Image (cartoon, rainbow, N blue to C red):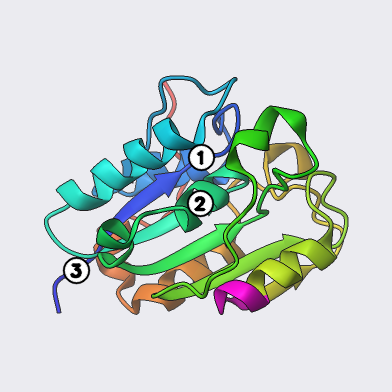
Amino acid sequence: MSAATLIIVPGWRDSGPGHWQSLWAERMPDAVRVVQDDWVTPRREAWVAALGKLVLESPGPVVIAAHSLGCIATVHLPEAAASRVRGALLVAPADPERRAALADFAPAPHARLPYRSILVASSNDPYCPVRLAGAYARAWGSEFVRMQNAGHINIDSGHGDWPLGLALLQSLTGEPSTLIGARSPFEPLATS
């Protein structure tokens, strides 16, 4: 089985400097990050198309690391793209049905995903009640990891490097060296 390409899928308003997704993108040489034309006014068709294009252009299978609205975009992938996904780490999914700016992504699909997935949610995420995240996990067939008082699992809640997330990502692939390269992801970045 060929090595998987890591595709990082940020959520609404992107993942800024210091966010675990940004750190992973900097430290994993073969990672590909989705870039959206409009981070502020997200439209499902455009977001899913941008992600689907990256998945379909990858030379082999992919593993997705999605955050917030990126999780919802991921589960909206059409069958042709979803069939190329080996696994997905879905972190702090958004609730598009209760947030007007994200309404174009509603309703969130409730079909079982055709690949292995791990959904990570926090007991106090201000953007998605943990009960809803648990319902998503059951509907999607995802393994469910509930974190206690971890907020939105982003830089604002203290999740920069986020070693647990990296361990969960590696559990999806069984191939840590292909995702990280020769350098440890926990090694501080050189600053000039």
Q: Considering only order in the chain, which callout, 2 or 3, is on the residue closer to the N terminus?
A: 3
The residue depicted at 56 percent of the width and 34 percent of the height is: 15
Instruction: Depth check: give the residue in front, 24 or 44.
Output: 44
Where is residue 141 drawn, in percent x and y? 56, 79
- Residue 144 visible to the viewer: no
- Can residue 60 be found in the magenta stretch? no
User: Answer yes or no: do the residues labelled 3 and 1 have beta carbons within 8 Å?
Assistant: no
Q: Which residue is mark 2?
A: 66
Secondary element at image label 2:
strand
Amino acid tagged 2: Ala
Question: Residue 42 vs residue 170: left or right?
Answer: right
Instruction: Depth check: give the residue in front, 147 or 100.
Output: 100
Q: CA distance from mark 3 to mark 1?
A: 22 Å
Quadrant of the rendering where the N terminus is positioned: bottom left
Where is residue 26 drawn, in percent x and y? 38, 39
Q: Which residue is mark 1?
A: 10
Q: Is residue 47 above or below residue 24?
A: above
Give the magenta-colored segment's residue range. Answer: 138-144
Where is residue 67 drawn, in percent x and y? 57, 48
Secondary element at image label 3:
loop
Amino acid tagged 1: Pro
Question: Residue 99 vs residue 70: left or right?
Answer: right
The residue depicted at 38 percent of the width and 30 percent of the height is: 35
Secondary element at image label 1:
loop
User: Answer yes or no: do the residues labelled 3 and 2 have beta carbons within 8 Å?
Assistant: no
Which disc, if any, is residue 153? none
Question: Residue 71 vs residue 33: left or right?
Answer: right
Q: Considering only order in the chain, which callout, 2 or 1, is on the residue closer to the N terminus?
A: 1
Q: Which residue is mark 3?
A: 3
Amino acid tagged 3: Ala
State which quadrant residue 60 falls in: bottom left
